[in-house]
Image: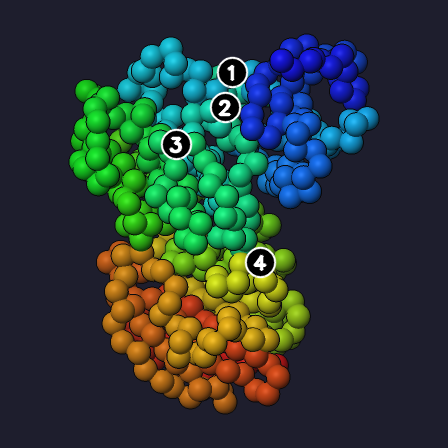
Amino acid sequence: MVTSPVRIGSYRIERLLGIGSFATVWLGYDASLGARVAIKVLAENWSHDLRIRERFLDEARMLWWLDDDRIVPVYALGELPDGRPYSVMAWADGGSLRDRLAGGPIPVRQAGPLLREICEGVAVLHNHGIVHRDLAPGNVLFRSRSAGSGPGSPAEQVVIADLGLAKALATASGLTARAGTPGYMAPEQDDPAAVVDLRTDVYGLGQLGIRLLGAPVRRRPDDPVRLRAGVPRKVADVLRVATAQRPAGRYRDAGAMAEALGRAMAGPRARPRARAATRATMALASAATVSALGFDVVGGGFSQQPGVAVDATGRISVRLPEGWRSTTGRWSWPADPGGPRYPALLISADPARWRTDDAVRGAFIGLARDGPAGRTPAALVGRLPHADCVPAQVRHSRQAGIDWVIAAFSCADQRGQLVEAAGTGPAGAGLVYVQIAPPADNASAFVDTLLAGVQVR
């Protein structure tokens, strides 16, 4: 039995909201503001485990940093007299999806838009390089919209909660503990050695979709999805792709799934809804697999001369193709997600859209003092996963004093071709990795011209 505290910080405790494996959540009330909040307190039996304590604090920091109305917001962090940390969060007064499903199926006319709204909420995490790892009905909450919401806005806002299992994409593959909700966990979450990435969350979203829109029948892995009456038949294809057993067969992230779901729900003549421009602080990633590199924006690129972009450290410069712009950041090796962060540049005609629109061309240039153990340029290229792409060729080219190993991939979608290149820079500079989505016309010449404009020191 859990004993209810009288107060936590400045809040009077009204009742228990829930108990989890690592924390207890209470409903608190601030009389001076007339406001209710949810207060999450680390469980007493975990209070001395520094790993769990840090994960608890990381969750609050991530929620504070994200600052998006589709993710449950955190207002403050505090500590109880016994030393246990707590976070003060917005109260989801509409309860959880688990609560609503316990009352019976949600009408199809509501379930379809609801699933897309959930996907768009998770896309906020994915746009910042965060993997949730536990997308289940209990972590999808409903919150009343404020009176200031625009006319015609729905009365409720879907919010994604409980990032306690989430980790930055740069470190997500290192966790060995089995974590997640049975029935919604991707197959790779049962393998401590497997890489957990954005596609792991896509599987959870697909399972949520089957729960919301699928017929209640037993289904084996990769079987066709049977839908409830009234659900457009193409939705079955979306859910089948999302729940593919192998990550390479799924959508690359929640945003891509949301767009596919929108097309399937609207019918064949509908066009994908344009996504809002991402904020300058987002962790950008290409529509291919720059996301696997853990690239984080640290500020806009700058230029010492017209048409040349330079990263924030001054160690990378590149001649920009006409009309292209740059964003500077940091990256980490996929093989060493918890390792050092290195300088990087992302260049494109529209850097903010490169992650969400396969038709947008762009390139990523990353520099590291050294590569993963034993990795030469020849061993590095062609090793990252590229969904729906097959290797086309490998060639060599010497440009700007660097001997490049170049691997080309033929992709089934709008990317058409994807190119990876790696080489060793001048003495002491380190290893250079480049990923390019070139224009369709004369791609090889474009790649060589771009590589000829890359300088590192």
Task: Single out the mark in the foreground, 1 or 3.
Answer: 3
Inter-mark Cα distance, 3 to 2? 19 Å
- Residue 44 in percent (x, y) is at 68, 27
Residue 151 seen anywhere in this rendered image of the structure: no
Inter-mark Cα distance, 1 to 4? 38 Å
Proximity of marks 4 and 3: CB atoms separated by less than 8 Å: no
Residue 104 seen anywhere in this rendered image of the structure: yes
> Is 218 located above or below residue 399 in the figure?
above
Task: Report the disc number at residue 338.
Answer: 4
Task: Single out the mark in the foreground, 3 or 2.
Answer: 3
Q: Which quadrant of the view contains residue 420?
A: bottom left
Viewer-proximal residue among 292 and 6? 6
- Kind of residue at badge 4: Gly
Q: Earlier in the sequence, mark 1 or mark 3?
A: 1
Q: Earlier in the sequence, mark 1 or mark 4?
A: 1
Q: Is residue 367 left or right of residue 236?
A: right
Where disc 1 sits, the SS reads loop
Neighbourhood count class around disc 2 (C-alpha, 10 Å): few under 14, some 14–19, many 20 upward: many
Q: Earlier in the sequence, mark 3 or mark 2?
A: 2
- Residue 291 in percent (x, y) is at 46, 56
The residue indicated by pointer 3 is 182
Q: Which quadrant of the view contains residue 19?
A: top right
Task: Report the disc number at residue 361.
Answer: none
Inter-mark Cα distance, 4 to 3? 27 Å
> Is 351 located above or below residue 273 in the figure?
below
Q: Is residue 160 left or right of residue 210?
A: right
Residue at horizontal 62%, vertical 84%? 428
The residue indicated by pointer 1 is 94
Neighbourhood count class around disc 3 (C-alpha, 10 Å): few under 14, some 14–19, many 20 upward: few
The residue indicated by pointer 2 is 141
- Kind of residue at badge 1: Gly
- Residue 166 in percent (x, y) is at 53, 41
